[in-house]
Image (tube, rainbow, N blue to C red):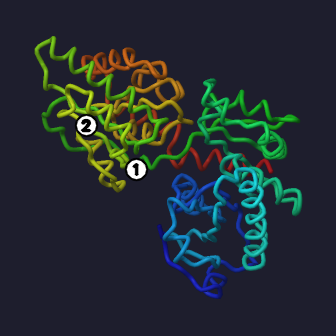
Amino acid sequence: MKRGLLLHRKEAQSRWPKSTPADVLILPSWYYPMGGEFCRDQALALTNSDLRADVLAPVLLPWRTYAKTLLFDSWNAELWDDEGILTYRKYFRRLPFCDMPNIVRWAHFTVLCFEEYEKLFGRPRIIHAHSSTWAGYAAFLLYKKYGIPYVLTEHRGIFGMKSELASSSFKPAYTPFLQLAFSNAQTILSVSDQLIPKIREYLTCEVPIEVLSNMVDTAFFAPSKVKKVTHPFRFITMNSYRDVKGYDILLPAFDAFCHRLQETGSPSDAELWIGGDGFEHNDFQRVLCACDFRAQIHFLGWLSPEEVRERLYESDAFVLASRVESQSIAVLEALSTGLPVVCTEVVPEAIVGTAQGLRVPVEQVQALSEALFQMHGTINNYTSEALFAHVEKIASSQYVVSCLKRSYSKL
């Protein structure tokens, strides 16, 4: 996926001269075409304030998913003007079944990319790494070699889990990399307080840790000014199919909820809208076929941000059955548009408290079904204005940028 205007080297240097280096160099652990929208949004918000934020994005692509890109796209570094953000991006091949070598290779490639970037655009004042795995480790290598201080934001939801899945994700071989990444950061920013205990396990010295949410464009995801059209009560979720998203819990819970509505005489008074892709997967189809009310489950496909917002406007409540989340941008966007949320306890209470919706234990079909029924009956207890104000307070671009500037200024 391409974003922005591809530039020749001299043209990029004229727009961003070496004599005025970046205030902040954003170093994501993953980026386009593999995601990283939150890193871009943060860089854009910083650039729209009075800081220059560049993005350095070495992207390690897996063969299975990106064979066409790996075969036909340029292997040279590319310079992009992405709405005023200087983006230095370069693709690398991921070696199959070589976990540890890929970590070392990616970190090594990142240092090489940084050296090329520095020759062209100068040395940034601060590096902001997103996730310890493995931008945090690469930031440590750059700090060790060049003395550039770095801030490390941890996003990964597995840091907040106490399940077997989370435990198996932290291989003993990862420990030295994580210790170096966290212990040498000048500041650690966690998107949720639930991640902090696990982060502390890898600290070999005291490092300040602060909680700072990911950013939501609250101006874009604002409540609709148009009155909702009457329709069956509509739950919506926005997650492509993956096991950790808990669709094997959500669909049976929705089915049980519909059975309960049927007992009250309103068998068709509910719908479930699902945005995203990957739902042709055999495991998902087996769960769907077992649902008695599958005719009331509708698939929206892959949606643009504008389409996401419109579908949220047409819904009554958001639902998330995930097994793993750090905080869920989709939940924040739904709250910002004025939808209350039913979610599992992987979403922090600071994001969804009793005033914003209902939280239930992970992998509990009955508890989730009960929460759907409760939300259906108490929807009028929530106001879009209050939900929007909550997100503005904790995740708006103005709030996040002000917190970032405060963290940067300490360096």
Percent position of residue 242, x then y: 45, 41
Residue under numbered circle 1: 219
Which of 365 and 391 lies nearest the eye of the viewer?
A: 365
Farthest residue toward the bottom?
Answer: 10
Looking at the image, is mark 2 or mark 1 nearer the viewer?
A: 2
For the residues labelled 2 and 1, the Cα–Cα distance comes to 19 Å
Left or right: 288 in relation to 99: left
Q: Residues at badges 2 and 1 in contact (C-beta under 8 Å)?
A: no
Farthest residue toward the left?
Answer: 265
Percent position of residue 244, x then y: 49, 35
Q: Which kind of residue does numbered mark 2 sit on? A: Ser
Which of 244 and 314 lies nearest the eye of the viewer?
A: 244
Percent position of residue 191, x then y: 61, 38
120 above or below 281? below
Residue under numbered circle 2: 315
Q: Secondary structure at mark 2?
A: loop
Q: Tell me what residue is drawn at x 15 percent, y 16 percent.
A: 262
* Residue 79 seen from this side: yes
Percent position of residue 145, x then y: 89, 62
100 above or below 336? below
Q: Tell me what residue is drawn at x 69 percent, y 30 percent.
A: 196
Which of 373 and 186 lies nearest the eye of the viewer?
A: 373
- Residue 167 picture quarter: top right
Mark 1 surroundings: few (<14), some (14-19) or many (≥20) residues within 10 A: few
Mark 2 or mark 1: name the one nearer the start of the chain: 1
Q: Tell me what residue is drawn at x 47 percent, y 46 percent.
A: 216
Q: Secondary structure at mark 1?
A: loop
